[in-house]
Structures are given as structure tokens and as C-alpha cells.
């Protein structure tokens, strides 16, 4: 048996699989996000551990025999979070999360230092870890002076599980301190933010063992012997392992709260000017590129909350619709945008609203706006050298076939729909735990699920979506200019 633990923003999920990678059981526990000021987003690190322990306690009660047979554990987690620990490994403040934009000024300053793009291959985005530490140094110097270790969210849970300060390559690539080509910390970039290698965790590949579960925890959960704990991965790389997007050239499109267009690469392929992320993958000798939308399904959830209905109720009238794009446009920049704009201050907007605009028209606009943002991602990826001709659909938003048809028509690529199942980051983490425990080939373990449907672009509608996308592309610079005046 093998466990995958996924530290999400809204919950911790534990997934238990057997040697055939069949799902045996899963449990989750909720998390809360604190927003003490506009643009801030924080969590209590100990809440991750409490939720993890609750989830594993529940599995131990319901599946004691299976938990006794666990040989490997893998970890996944939301990236970029600045978890600052003192000398006694106690958190010094709440973790500053991936969607916190308070350090936009510090990120811009670091990005103007040419060493960061040259060594990491990436823009220094406000959500990344390094600018958050610069912000802490400026605004909370008493905290910064006490920082003994900087960990990413899943790696704080690892510390509680194993007592080890460790991380994997994929998650660490999102800090702006990693030499991504060399898969090692950059002492030069750490020094630029007044930190040293001693304050960083030890680096491992995602499929390598980073330690073993503490004996007292193995006893708590009834495990026959302490299992190994794998490096794991950042949430997107772990999700790629879950859906089998590990071989070079394979891709997925994720419609979660944020949106990701992800492609696996055989080599490091940076192009910072495109705002494409170029990171290490969670499997050895492999990298990946991805375009990131900060508000994908999150945009639909926002509209649903505004109308007081569920997202499913919003999209239901459109599911059988096979027509082209609507007249209303939506820019999905509710919390700024990553690819291709790297703009933390831009906000979303509707245009083209008339007396005839109703709830369904606004819903269509949101679905199309997110698809157009993915088209921006695809253009950036292609400029950065990636060749994406088809992608697996994952994430909660992928349940809407209408949304997938819009994306296929807008991107003009085939969208593969996997069979029903949990193929997310939790499964990817469990697979990495299996590889670490058994010394298995990660490329043989991380296979793709059965495809039940392929949505091909509708050739009669592709030109109409291309024309609508061209209009969408003109809105951002126009609105951005108007916001300045």
C-alpha cells in the first residue's frame, strides 16, 4: 500500500492506493485561508499538520489492515508558500501563500536583477517565495532575523512526518532560488536576498526517499514498519504524475481554481519574456513548462457566488449548446494574471453588456474568457518552444463538456477526457511514494488513465473563436491604459 498526501489551499487530502494503483480509500480535512489585508493570503502551517493527522487517523480507523501495509508515502502541495521557521522548527509567522501579492514591488526589484532570469529561467513573480522573504526583511525585520529554515508548505508536513528538512526539485523551482538547469540551490541568488544554503532544505528528486516516517507516527497509524517518504512534488508536477504527463511532449490542461497548461520537456527550455514557467519536473532528468491563469474555475465560482447558485447550475443551460462565441467578453483577471502579462494589479472585467445580457450570457463569457486566457498560454508556450497538439483535461471545471468544447475550438487542439477517477496530485504523490519505496521506474508507474472521449475542434467554429479571441487580445492593453489615467 502507498499513501499520497496533497496539501491544498482549501483542504488536505490523503489517498491510499494498492500495488496495482487502484484507489483503496481517501480522506480529507478542510483548511481556511486568512486575508488580513487586501492582496494578502496566509495560512497557519500547523493547520496543515492537524488536517494531515486527522486524515490519516481516519484512514487508520476505517482501513487498519491496509494502513498497516503502507510502504511508501508521497507528498504534494501548493507551491511558493513562505513557511518561516525558527531554530526550534516552530513557525515564526503565518505562511504567505502562492496567491498573496503583497510582495509585487519586491518581485519587480529582484526581476530587474538579470541574474534571476539567467539562473532560474523564470520571471520573478510576486507569488514566488524569494520576494516574500525580501518583504519580510523590510516589514518584519525581527522575524527575518530569526529565520533558521525556509520551507514550502508540503515540506513543513514532511518535517512533522520525518524530522527532516527536505524538498524536491519541482516545488523548489518555484522559489526563485533554484538553478533550474543544474537542479541545485543558487548560492548567488540566495545571497541576493540575504539568505544562505544553510537556511534551505536538502534537495531530492521527487521519486527519491527523503527519510522515513517517525516511529511514533507509524505506531499511531498502525503501520508494521515506518514507510519511506518520497520527495514528492509541487501540486502541478504531482498532478502531471497522476495523469501520466511525464514523457516529453505530453500535456494537460487544468481547470482548477487557477488554470494551468502544462507540457513535459526532455530538457530545460526557459524563455522568461513569455512569462511561461520553466521548472524541474518531479521525475528525474525531466523538466516542464506551463502557462498559469490565476482565476480559471475560480472565475466561474465567483460568478456562481454572485448569483447565489452553484457552478453547475450556471453551466447547465449551455451544456447542449453547440454554437459559437457570444457577444459579451470577460477578462478573468480577478486577482491579477501570470502568463503572459505578469500583472498583479490588473483586475477582471466584462465588456459588450447590453439590455439583453442575462445570467447565461455572462456564464458563457466567463467560460470563453478563461479559454482565451488559455490561448494566451498556448501562444506563450509555443513561443518558448513547446509543441502542444493535444492535452488531457483535469480539474473540477473539466466536468463541463461545453467548457472543454470551447477550449478545443479556441486552442484548436484535441482535448482528451480521462475516465472518472481521482487522477490528481494525491495520486501523483502516492505514485512517487511507490517509486521511492520499490525502486520502480517512474515513467512506467506514472502512466496515463484510460481516455473515454476526445473532443476535437469543430472546424466550422474555429474561425469564429479565432476572431473573438483577437478581440479579447485587444481588451487588456486598452483597459490597462485606461486604468492608468
Image (tube, grey):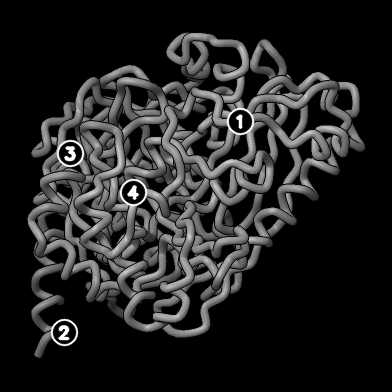
Separation of residues labelled 1 and 3 (CA atoms): 36 Å
Q: Is residue 101 above or below residue 220?
A: below
Separation of residues labelled 1 and 4 (CA atoms): 23 Å
Q: Secondary structure at mark 4?
A: loop
Mark 3 — residue?
Answer: 381
Q: Tell me which label, 2 or 4, sits earlier in the chain.
A: 4
Answer few, some or many: residues within 10 Å of disc 1's Cα (few below 14, many 20 plus, some between 14 and 19): many
The reply to whether residue 285 is visible in this rendering is yes
Viewer-side residue, 149 vs 171? 149
Q: Tell me which label, 3 or 4, sits earlier in the chain.
A: 4
In the visual, does 192 lie left or right of 20?
left
Mark 1 — residue?
Answer: 211
Separation of residues labelled 2 and 4 (CA atoms): 30 Å
Name the disc covering residue 286, or none: none
Viewer-side residue, 87 vs 384? 87
The reply to whether residue 300 is visible in this rendering is no
Q: Tell me which label, 1 or 4, sits earlier in the chain.
A: 4
Mark 4 — residue?
Answer: 174
Residue sitting at x 38%, y 44% = 172
- Image marks 1 and 3: residues in contact by CB distance under 8 Å: no
Name the disc covering residue 483, or none: 2
Q: Secondary structure at mark 3?
A: helix
Residue 287 found in image quarter: top left
Amino acid at each position: 500500500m502507498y499513501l499520497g498526501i496533497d496539501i491544498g489551499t482549501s483542504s488536505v487530502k490523503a489517498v491510499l492506493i494498492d500495488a496495482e494503483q487502484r484507489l483503496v480509500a481517501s480522506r480529507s480535512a478542510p483548511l481556511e485561508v486568512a486575508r488580513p489585508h487586501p492582496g494578502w493570503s496566509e495560512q497557519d502551517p500547523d493547520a496543515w499538520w492537524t488536517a494531515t493527522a486527522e486524515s490519516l487517523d481516519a484512514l487508520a480507523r476505517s482501513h487498519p489492515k491496509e494502513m498497516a501495509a503502507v510502504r511508501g508515502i508521497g507528498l504534494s502541495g501548493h507551491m511558493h508558500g513562505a513557511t518561516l521557521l525558527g531554530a526550534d522548527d516552530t513557525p515564526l509567522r503565518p505562511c504567505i501563500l502562492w496567491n498573496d501579492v503583497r510582495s509585487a514591488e519586491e518581485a519587480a526589484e529582484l526581476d530587474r536583477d538579470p541574474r534571476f532570469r539567467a539562473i532560474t529561467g523564470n520571471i520573478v513573480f510576486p507569488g514566488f517565495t524569494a520576494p516574500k522573504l525580501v518583504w519580510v526583511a523590510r516589514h518584519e525585520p525581527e522575524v527575518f532575523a530569526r529565520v533558521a529554515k525556509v520551507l514550502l508548505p508540503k515540506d513543513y508536513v514532511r518535517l512533522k512526518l520525518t524530522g527532516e528538512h527536505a524538498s524536491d526539485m519541482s516545488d523548489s523551482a518555484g522559489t526563485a532560488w533554484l538553478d533550474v538547469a543544474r537542479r541545485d540551490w543558487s548560492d548567488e541568488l540566495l545571497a541576493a536576498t540575504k539568505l544562505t544554503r544553510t537556511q534551505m532544505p536538502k534537495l531530492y528528486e521527487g521519486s527519491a526517499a527523503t527519510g522515513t516516517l517517525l516511529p511514533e507516527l507509524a505506531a499511531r497509524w498502525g503501520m508494521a514498519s515506518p514507510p519511506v517518504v518520497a520527495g514528492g512534488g509541487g501540486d502541478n508536477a504531482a498532478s502531471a504524475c497522476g495523469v501520466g504527463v511525464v514523457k516529453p511532449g505530453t500535456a494537460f490542461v487544468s481547470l482548477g481554481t487557477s488554470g494551468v497548461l502544462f507540457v513535459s520537456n526532455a530538457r530545460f527550455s526557459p524563455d522568461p519574456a513569455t512569462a511561461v514557467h520553466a521548472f524541474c519536473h518531479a521525475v528525474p532528468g525531466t523538466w516542464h513548462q506551463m502557462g498559469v491563469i490565476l482565476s480559471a474555475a475560480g472565475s466561474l465560482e465567483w460568478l456562481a457566488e454572485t448569483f447565489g447558485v452553484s457552478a453547475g447550475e450556471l453551466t447547465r443551460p449551455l451544456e447542449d449548446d453547440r454554437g459559437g462565441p457570444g457577444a459579451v467578453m470577460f477578462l478573468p483577471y480577478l486577482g491579477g494574471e501570470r502568463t503572459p502579462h505578469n500583472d498583479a494589479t490588473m483586475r477582471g472585467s466584462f465588456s459588450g453588456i447590453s439590455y439583453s445580457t442575462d445570467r447565461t450570457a455572462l456564464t458563457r463569457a466567463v467560460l470563453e474568457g478563461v479559454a482565451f486566457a488559455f490561448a494566451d498560454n498556448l501562444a506563450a508556450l509555443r513561443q518558448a518552444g513547446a509543441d502542444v497538439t493535444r492535452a488531457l483535461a483535469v480539474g473540477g471545471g473539466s466536468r463541463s463538456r461545453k467548457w472543454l468544447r470551447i477550449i478545443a475550438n479556441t486552442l484548436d487542439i484535441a482535448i482528451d477526457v480521462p475516465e472518472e477517477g481521482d487522477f490528481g496530485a494525491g495520486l501523483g504523490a502516492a505514485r512517487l511514494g511507490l517509486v521511492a519505496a520499490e525502486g520502480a521506474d517512474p515513467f512506467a508507474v506514472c502512466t496515463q488513465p484510460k481516455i473515454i472521449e476526445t473532443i476535437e475542434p469543430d472546424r466550422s467554429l474555429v474561425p469564429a473563436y479565432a476572431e473573438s479571441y483577437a478581440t479579447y487580445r485587444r481588451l487588456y492593453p486598452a483597459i490597462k491604459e485606461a486604468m492608468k489615467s
